[in-house]
Amino acid sequence: MTMINDEEAVFSQNGGARIDSWNTSYATLSGYRTALRLTCLNQDYVFPVSKIVSLRRHRGLFSIGLRIDHSVPLYPGYIVFWVSLALRSSPFALLKERLEALGYEVQE
């Protein structure tokens, strides 16, 4: 697992991502007590708890994801981590459970 400021990730989950208008099938979301890290498109997006405005379930045309609303000025405004294809809700439920165990609030 990857580290942020000497803190090891509590979990990492593979999926896809949409960053503004770019979609990718290869992304990893790592959960830390102090931040979330999304790795995709040769970029690392680190969202400290203080910069996360909200985390919420996001339904796309063919998938379910986690929308990350944030206040990091240098990052794109529209960021979704896709956790499930074919609109299956169980992978999202597992991600939500993992995030809430770390103290994050995830809106349905």
Image: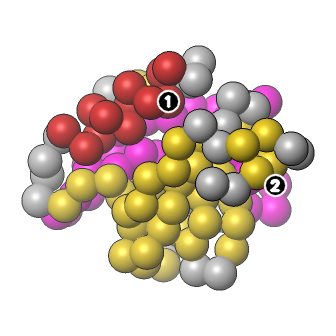
Which numbered disc, 2 or 1, marks the residue that appears first in the sequence? 2
Residue 1 seen anywhere in this rendered image of the structure: yes
Looking at the image, is 103 positioned above or below residue 48? Answer: above
Find disc 1 in the rendering and name its residue.
Answer: 99
Q: Nearer the viewer, mark 2 or mark 1?
A: 1
Q: Is residue 82 left or right of residue 50?
A: left
Q: How is the image coloured?
A: secondary structure
Task: Say what secondary structure mark 2 lies in.
Answer: loop
Identified at 32% across, 53% down, the residue is: 83
Name which quarter of the figure residue 24 lies in.
Answer: bottom left
Name which quarter of the figure residue 52 lies in.
Answer: top right
Identified at 59% across, 18% down, the residue is: 103
Find residue 73 and name its label: 2
The type of residue carrying mark 2 is: Pro
Please rate how many residues cluster around mark 1, counting C-alpha atoms within 10 Å: few if below 14, some from 14 to 19, many from 20: many
Looking at the image, is 26 positioned above or below residue 80? Answer: below
Q: Which residues are magenta?
A: 46-75
Identified at 44% across, 53% down, the residue is: 13
Look at the image and tell me in which quarter the C terminus lies: top left
The type of residue carrying mark 1 is: Leu
Q: Measured from the top left, where is residue 54 in percent x and y?
A: 56, 32
Q: Measured from the top left, where is residue 26 in percent x and y?
A: 43, 75
Please rate how many residues cluster around mark 2, counting C-alpha atoms within 10 Å: few if below 14, some from 14 to 19, many from 20: few
Residue 68 seen anywhere in this rendered image of the structure: no
Q: Measured from the top left, where is residue 89 in percent x and y?
A: 17, 40
